[in-house]
Image (cartoon, rainbow, N blue to C red):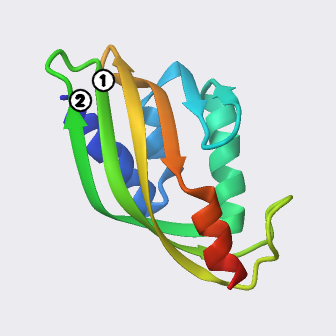
Amino acid sequence: MTKAVIEAYYSAFNRGDVEAMLALLDTDVEHHVNEGGIRRGKTAFAEFCAHMNHSYRERLTDVVVFANEDGTRGAAEFVVNGEYLRTDSGLPEARGQRYVLPGGAFFTLKGGRISRVTTYYNLQDWIRQVSA
C-alpha cells in the first residue's frame, strides 16, 4: 500500500492535480523542503504548491519507489524535467530556462496517508543550469 500511495502522489504531481496530492496527505503533514524549513499542515503544503506552480513547470520521469516492510516509510528517486517560468525570490531571473536534474524524496506514512515528505535535489546544479 505504501508504494501505491507514493506512486499516486507522483502521478497527481505530474498531472498538476494538487487536490489529489492533498487527499493523500495526513492533516498534520510535515513538508521538509530542500534547503528550507518545515511546512506543517495541508494549508501550508497547498500554498507551497501554488507558489511552485506559479514559478515552475515540472514533470518527473524515471520515478522509482521503495518502501519498508511495515509500510510506515518510503522513498522515491526521480528525474526532474522542468521549465523556470517566473523569477523566484533570491534566485536567478527566469527566462523560460529548461533544466533536468536528479531528485529524491523520503516519506513517512501514518494510517495510509503521507505524514512527512522530505525532498532533496542539488540546488547548485539547478542554479548552474538556469544561469547558463
Q: Which mark is residue 5?
A: none
Q: Residue at x 61, y 67 (%)?
A: 126
Q: Residues within 10 Å of mark 1 (few under 14, many from 20)?
A: many
Badge count: 2
Q: Amino acid at mark 2?
A: Thr
Q: Disc 1 or 2, which lies upstream in sequence?
A: 2
Q: Quadrant of the N terminus?
A: top left
Task: Estimate the spatial distance between the alpha carbons at disc 1 and disc 2, rounded to whole Å.
Answer: 7 Å
Q: Which residue is mark 2?
A: 2
Figure quadrant of residue 86: bottom right
Residue 100 versus residue 16: which sits nearer the camera? 100
Residue 21 placement (x, y as % from top left) = 45, 42
Q: Are marks 1 and 2 in contact (CB under 8 Å)?
A: yes
Residue 118 versus residue 111: which sits nearer the camera? 118
Q: Is 130 placed above or below 12 here?
A: below
- Residue at the extreme right: 90
Residue 4 placement (x, y as % from top left) = 21, 38
Q: Residue at x 70, y 38 (%)?
A: 36
Q: Is residue 117 visible?
A: yes
Residue 74 placement (x, y as % from top left) = 29, 31
Of the residues tagged 1 and 2, which is closer to the observer? 1
Figure quadrant of residue 42: top right
Q: Is 90 placed above or below 128 here?
A: above
Q: Residue at x 38, y 22 (%)?
A: 108
